[in-house]
């Protein structure tokens, strides 16, 4: 899903895509009255799910045009929008990309086509991401990445540790793990994974952007994010969690060899663990995230995507009809789970479709029960039009902080992120409060 | 243009049309036809992108209000704004400083080793020079992204065989990816890939030296070291200057190595080198306009440094050829 090592390759691909994007043409509306829709998506085997729709709906035929991944697809779409033609009818868009796409006038507001009627199918935090907290609806949620805490149950048992339910308990567990064997860590603070940190801040109650009337607000340097930064800065300074990035060969080896005893990750973690830590199958367990306030459980989102309708589509009504079916119909959602291997955003349909645990977690029969409970508690979070800028500021500023191993530098990094993000918005001309 | 000349008066009238035609064909059409591939490629892939980059660098994208929906984004003339922003950006100055330091570390070591290897290969007593030449040159054939991945693995203590040995020996070797050492880690990758290429350039130039000069020097009682120091190096100085110039330009453009290593460490920022800064502005921050301005600045600086360098060393290096 997010292999850092592949990023440069992906970036190169994006550049190549820029050159070829102009060549794709949308031909829709055949003479026979059949509406033809193009759908750019990168989720594996999504075309097989779409085949079900095509069989049942001869009047609306959808063609999946497979994309390389989240970033290249968006770059390609933005190019097509600038060019004025060549965009598909439907696009798979990650949640954090939606404001950028809306700002570039790439995604249509589909509230008029009835997309607002399915609001209750999704967790509040997920729905917020597709509406930007406004009355408009810019996409229909497809999959989500509610964050969970993964830990080595065997190591916890051996050390006599209880599963942490609060962040204080997490800190104690981190100390105990590291004290038992100085080579081992309960977790790492990764300055390379802005989406991970965003999820942690979201859990603490942060919402980095907001729309206030006709002005944007940026609230990165507010209490929730500072609290998260202070907590991790403290653990890094103390030396009880690691300070090196995730998704490095070293980190992968650590998962497999057992020096990484836990991982704060998302619902899709079993796939990563099965790939990187095959030797530890059956030893991991998933639990809800440690909480700031145990009486009001919350979690953040790390990953996940939605289905949007582009402004160049000539058939928005049909496109919305298809996207609604794809993401909320029980049969479609079941197919998404079994063939595309995603965790559906539709909470009720997800619970119905997911019964057996992932193979890697066969030791935890209630895996998806825990997940379903956690998915309900995704805290609201609004992304802004320059998520990319904030994320790269996170990379740079928190890398310096993590390298210094000083708690104070972590809090400074939050302030620096705020400044870089807000300066960029002002420079671009956004009205910022 | 001097090529389109009137036919000379000595040509007789009845031959004139044919002569003119063939004259035109030979003196105008044919040369341009032969130049055409070069000119077309230059215009399409050099001149046009440069002009377009210049054009972009004087523009900016301006958003109004919330910036949501159609018509909220317009492209306007920016004047020198992008240039002012890029030159006053402390990140740009910092990245330039890092790259200068990188060059100071890399170029002398790389050229020194390349010269040493070339001289050793050229020495009469060397055995197995074909194999050694290929072995030293081979890393140049490995793309920088691949070599950075390879070295990245070797730098990470938990997966590196070197650190495994250090650990067994009980040595506490700090990670090369720590912020104080990362510049050496990157220099090392460039060194590994670059020595072979520069060695071949210098070696080729050594091979062009007539051997009777060496014979004469030998008769006068020169040792191999003296021949190298007093004869070979002065003669091949132009080649050394060329490799130095190429290395300087390559150094200013360092991108692949730090970009590939970046996910492995906290020590490399997204604006570590000037080109990384350009890449980030263009593709991560979606601000192609200021990226264009920074690119122009980098190109001008590269040009100025190359020009100055040549001016300074030209007399010394090429003086004796005149």
Image: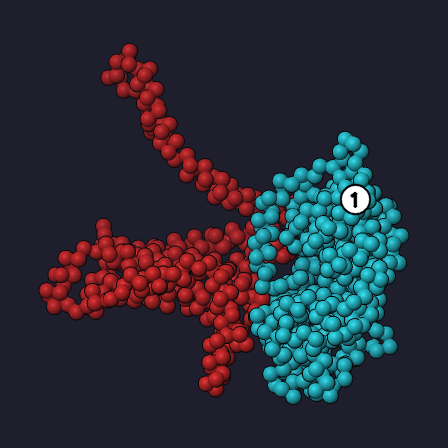
Chain colours: A cyan, B red
Identify the element where label 1 is drawn.
helix
Q: Residue at x 80, y 64 (%)?
A: A354
Residue A47: x, y in percent? 72, 49
Residue A264: x, y in percent? 71, 73
Is B322 positioned to the left or the right of A266 in the image? left
Furthest residue in direction left, as rendered: B219
Chain at numbered mark 1: A
Is A349 positioned to the left or the right of B319 in the image? right
Work out whether B127 lies above or below B165.
above
Q: Residue at x 42, y 54 (%)?
A: B304
Work out whether A153 lies above or below A211.
below
Q: Is residue A61 visible?
A: yes
Q: Which residue is mark 1?
A: A55
Q: Residue at x 20, y 62 (%)?
A: B231
Quadrant into which the C terminus of chain A falls:
bottom right
Q: Would you identify the image quadrant in which residue A420 lies?
A: bottom right
């Amino acid at each position: 899903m997010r292999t850092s090592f592949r990023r440069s390759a992906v970036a190169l691909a994006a550049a190549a895509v820029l050159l070829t994007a102009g060549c794709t043409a949308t031909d829709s509306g055949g003479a026979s009255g059949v509406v033809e829709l193009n759908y750019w998506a990168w989720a594996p085997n999504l075309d097989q799910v779409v085949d079900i729709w095509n069989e049942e709906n001869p009047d609306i035929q959808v063609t999946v045009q497979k994309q390389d991944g989240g970033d290249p697809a968006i770059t390609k779409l933005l190019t097509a929008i600038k060019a004025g033609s060549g965009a598909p009818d439907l696009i798979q868009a990650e949640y954090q990309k939606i404001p950028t796409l809306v700002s570039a006038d790439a995604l249509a507001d589909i509230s008029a086509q009835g997309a607002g009627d399915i609001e209750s199918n999704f967790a509040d935090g997920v729905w917020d991401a597709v509406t930007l907290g406004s009355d408009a609806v810019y996409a229909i949620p497809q999959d989500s990445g509610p964050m969970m805490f993964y830990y080595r149950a065997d190591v916890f048992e051996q050390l006599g540790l209880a599963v942490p339910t609060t962040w204080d308990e997490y800190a104690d567990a981190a100390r105990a793990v590291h004290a038992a064997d100085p080579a081992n860590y309960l977790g790492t603070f990764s300055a390379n994974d802005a989406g991970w940190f965003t999820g942690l801040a979201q859990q603490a109650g942060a919402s980095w952007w907001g729309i206030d009337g006709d002005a944007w607000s940026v609230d990165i340097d507010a209490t929730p994010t500072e609290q998260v930064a202070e907590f991790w800065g403290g653990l890094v300074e103390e030396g009880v969690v690691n300070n090196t990035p995730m998704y490095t060969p070293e980190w992968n080896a650590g998962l497999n060899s057992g020096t990484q005893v836990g991982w704060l990750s998302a619902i899709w973690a079993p796939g990563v663990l099965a790939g990187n830590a095959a030797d530890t199958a059956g030893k991991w367990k998933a639990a809800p995230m440690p909480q700031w306030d145990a009486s009001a459980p919350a979690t953040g989102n790390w990953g996940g995507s939605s289905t949007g309708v582009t402004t160049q589509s000539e058939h928005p009504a049909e496109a919305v009809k298809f996207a609604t079916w794809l993401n909320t119909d029980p049969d479609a959602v079941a197919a998404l789970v079994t063939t595309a291997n995603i965790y559906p955003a539709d909470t009720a349909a997800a619970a119905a479709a997911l019964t057996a645990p992932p193979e890697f977690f066969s030791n935890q029969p209630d895996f998806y029960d825990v997940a379903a409970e956690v998915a309900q508690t995704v805290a609201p979070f609004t992304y802004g039009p320059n998520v990319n800028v904030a994320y790269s500021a996170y990379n740079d500023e928190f890398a310096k902080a993590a390298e210094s191993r000083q708690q104070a530098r972590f809090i400074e990094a939050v302030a620096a992120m705020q400044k870089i993000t807000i300066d960029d918005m002002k420079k671009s001309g956004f009205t910022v409060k | 243009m001097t090529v389109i000349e009137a036919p000379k008066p000595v040509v007789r009238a009845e031959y004139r049309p044919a002569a003119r035609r063939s004259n035109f064909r030979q003196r105008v059409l044919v040369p341009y036809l032969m130049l055409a591939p070069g000119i077309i490629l230059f215009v399409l892939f050099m001149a046009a992108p440069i002009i377009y980059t210049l054009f972009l660098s004087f523009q900016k994208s301006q958003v109004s209000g919330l910036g949501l929906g159609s018509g909220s984004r317009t492209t306007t003339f920016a004047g020198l704004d992008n240039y002012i922003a890029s030159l006053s950006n402390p990140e740009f100055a910092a990245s330039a400083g890092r790259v200068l330091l990188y060059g100071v570390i890399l170029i002398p070591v790389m050229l020194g080793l390349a010269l040493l290897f070339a001289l050793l290969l050229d020495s009469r007593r060397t055995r197995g020079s074909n194999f050694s030449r290929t072995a030293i040159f081979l890393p140049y054939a490995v793309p920088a992204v691949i070599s950075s991945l390879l070295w990245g693995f070797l730098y990470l203590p938990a997966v590196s065989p070197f650190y495994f040995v250090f650990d067994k020996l009980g040595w506490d070797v700090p990670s090369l990816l720590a912020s104080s050492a990362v510049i050496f880690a990157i220099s090392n990758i460039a060194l590994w890939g670059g020595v072979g290429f520069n060695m071949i350039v210098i070696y080729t130039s050594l091979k062009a030296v007539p051997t009777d000069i060496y014979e004469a020097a030998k008769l006068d009682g020169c040792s191999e070291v003296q021949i190298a120091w007093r004869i070979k190096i002065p003669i091949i100085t132009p080649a050394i200057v060329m490799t130095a110039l190429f290395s300087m330009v390559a150094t200013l453009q360092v991108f692949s190595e730090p970009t590939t290593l970046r996910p492995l460490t906290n020590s490399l920022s997204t604006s570590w080198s000037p080109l990384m800064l350009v890449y980030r502005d263009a593709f991560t921050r979606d601000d192609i306009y200021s990226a264009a301005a920074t690119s122009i600045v980098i190109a001008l600086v590269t040009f100025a440094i190359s020009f100055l360098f040549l001016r300074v060393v030209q007399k010394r290096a090429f003086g004796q050829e005149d």
